[in-house]
Image: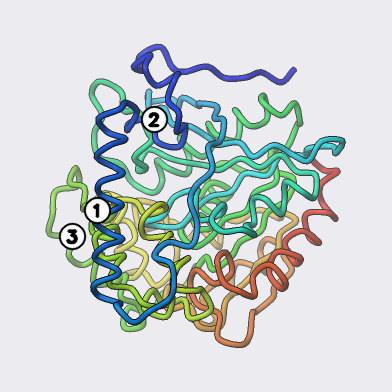
Amino acid sequence: MPFEATLPENTDPRLATSLDVRRPREAGVGQAVARAVGDAALALTWRVVQARSREVFLGATPSPLSRVYYTADDGWQAPIYVVPARPGTTGEPVLLAHGLGGSGLDFDLGASSLARSLAESGYTVYLFEHRGDRSAIPPAHAGPFTADDLATRDLDAAVQTVRQHSGFARVLTVGHGFGAQLLLLRYALMGVDDIAGSVLIGGAVRFEAERSSTRAWAQVAQLLPSSWVLPGRRFQQLASPFVASGAELSSPGTEGALARAHLRHASGDLHVGVLKQVGRWFDAGHLTDATGRFDVVAGLPSLASLVIEPDADPACPAGAAEPAAAPLGAYFERLSGGWGHLDPLLGARAGADVFPRVEHFLEATRRKCW
């Protein structure tokens, strides 16, 4: 039977009455005032820097969502935000996994988002957050972690929680960028018996070091303690007034106001333990587990899947995602016409081009949830 998860026992009870359920750690009047003042300062900076622009500073504001919590086997807890299916529909569950340095909001920004589109099509949408996100609650003695931990602990616990909450035996999944890579890690390391189908957008599985700025971050990470956290969220927020267009985020099809909204609302920090594993991918030239010895693509099981590869994404250059299609037995589609990193989710063409592809595939596999 479905259940509505409650807040974990070790959670501050004030969180239960937070007006903004997306920000459980920022509950309270003082924090709300500070956030409002910070937003005003960012907006003023935008107006000073872009004095001649008629664009609004931010093109979207997050809507409050309900949440259910999962607990990983090592004590980490995190929320999954829920976008309910349109009333009168069957509500098969779709779990959405976000990219590196982002958050679940990447799927729910703007007037037309993938999360809302799927909910309107009759799916119950779950926005996955993991221990690397600001919403997570660590156990008493939390240590550093890798992408393997996110995939085999957090993602697996999230899948089981979604199954229980939705009442369906299997879950559909959609991953973007690093989220797609986490899904692939989970499939190769733990199997797919509880997965009905998967859409993988811009999830590179082959790497050429000279073709990605991510490599520079990974090289820096090798020199730092694995327990360190790089303040990517704060940096992106402070940078938002200086971003005039999506092209500055390698997303030329995304309007500037929406690109800035992504930086302000959907950005996340970078954990060194995870970045070190990403560095091993570049060293090996392919997606691996934390040891660097297991080729994830070679270990993939067969699964009804759709692999989508943008044609102008520096994080997933042409041909970098395609090798995952064959072992999965997946459909492969390349987006042509200058699709950057965020464009399949936030770009002006996403609602007319990418979302229908995703929905068409999920429609063909949704009954496997039963």
User: Residue 292 location, x and y as percent?
Assistant: 35, 58
Q: Quadrant of residue 306?
A: bottom right
- The amino acid pointed to by label 3 is Gln
Q: Which residue is mark 3?
A: 222
The CA distance from mark 1 to mark 3 is 22 Å
Q: Which residue is mark 2?
A: 24
Q: Colour scheme in the image? A: rainbow
User: Residue 269 location, x and y as percent?
Assistant: 29, 51
Q: Residue at (48%, 62%) from the top-left corner?
A: 59
- The amino acid pointed to by label 2 is Pro
The residue carrying pointer 3 sits among few (fewer than 14), some (14 to 19) or many (20 or more) residues within 10 Å by Cα, namely some
The CA distance from mark 2 to mark 1 is 17 Å
- In the picture shown, does residue 339 fall above or below 134? below
Task: Locate the C terminus and report the quarter of the image it occupies.
Answer: top right
- In the picture shown, does residue 126 fall above or below 169? below
Q: Nearer the viewer, residue 247 or 91?
A: 247
The CA distance from mark 2 to mark 3 is 32 Å
For marks 2 and 3 on the same chain, the one whose residue lies earlier in the sequence: 2
Q: Nearer the viewer, residue 349 or 154?
A: 349
Secondary structure under the numbered disc 1 in the rendered image: helix
Q: Residue at (29%, 42%) from the top-left corner?
A: 35
Secondary structure under the numbered disc 2 in the rendered image: helix
User: Residue 198 location, x and y as percent?
Assistant: 68, 54
Q: Which residue is mark 1?
A: 234
Q: Nearer the viewer, mark 1 or mark 3?
A: 1
The residue carrying pointer 1 sits among few (fewer than 14), some (14 to 19) or many (20 or more) residues within 10 Å by Cα, namely some
User: Residue 135 location, x and y as percent?
Assistant: 38, 36
Task: Locate the N terminus and report the quarter of the image it occupies.
Answer: top right
Instruction: Answer left or right for 35 relative to 173.
Output: left
